[in-house]
Image (cartoon, rainbow, N blue to C red):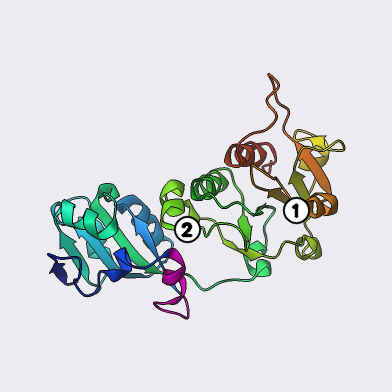
Amino acid sequence: MPIIDIDSLQHKGVEVFCSLTEAQMRNRLEPARGIFIAESPKVIKVALDAGYEPLAMLCERKHIEGDAREIIKRVGDIPVYTGERELLADITGYTLTRGVLCAMHRPVEKSVGEVTEGAKRVVVIDGVVDTTNIGAIFRSAAALGIDAVLLTKNSCDPLNRRAVRVSMGAVFLVPWTWINVSLETLKNLGFRTAALALSDDSISIDSPLLNAVERLAVVVGTEGDGLPKETIRNADFVVRIPMSHNVDSLNVAAAATVAFWELRRR
């Protein structure tokens, strides 16, 4: 792989790391598939292990023979741009985590049916736009046995750089795709749906009714407005997490984690 020393922000090839927005990366470069940025050797390794294809790397010079050494051996014949810490911070607008970024191809988008084939427990993320919450939900999903993640189109992109970093690469470990807001698609695939919401007719998350369901889709929404009324109305179950000390709700990532553990396959 070519190691390319750079000494300015205008060096050809580094624009993917500095001048493109998340939306532009999805469709300006490699328009058929788009690209995304993975940050830190650990996260990049998880992506490579999962079969993601690298395009270029940006690496702090001191890490060429350090933290990034094994990653560089694995990425094949792609450009590896390198420079001093200060220059790379100027290029990206922030100090790199462990000094390494990797631009990678986005995966080919799969259908809901493909992603959920054989799945017993899935999560539907409805309208969650905070990158930290998306990353945290994916990390919990991977750790606690969720088989697939489905996101409505108004949710944050799981391959957003910060979401990927917060997930510690878990976005590469759990199959995911986009879904429309209707739950009918899941019901037609044999899932029953459980919406996490505060409602007069809700049941406790530890209800035996839920663990008895063979294929269950847990639906979570934003902290502010929660799930749309139509989604709650069309769910098979409306589920609440019992609270103490008059606390009315949890952060969506925390609530999802509780749900994943309680509703896991036994």
Give the mark, 2 or 1, whose residue is nearer the N terminus.
Answer: 2
Circle 2 is placed at which residue position? 172
Helix, strand or loop status at disc 1: loop
- The label nearer to you, 2 versus 1, is 2
Q: What percent of the width, then of the height, locates residue 168?
A: 42, 48
- State the quadrant of the C terminus: top right
Circle 1 is placed at which residue position? 215
Residues shaded magenta: 22-33
What residue lies at 28% left-to-right and 70% top-to-bottom?
A: 15
Q: What percent of the width, then of the height, locates residue 84?
A: 14, 55
Q: Amino acid at mark 1?
A: Arg
Question: In the image, which disc is placed on residue 228?
Answer: none
Q: Amino acid at mark 2?
A: Phe
Against 1, residue 237 (above or below) is: above
Crowding near the residue tagged with mark 1, few <14, some 14–19, many ≥20 C-alpha atoms within 10 Å: many
User: Seen in the image, is 179 located left or right of residue 131?
Assistant: right
Crowding near the residue tagged with mark 2, few <14, some 14–19, many ≥20 C-alpha atoms within 10 Å: many
Q: Separation of disc 2 and disc 1 at Cα?
A: 23 Å
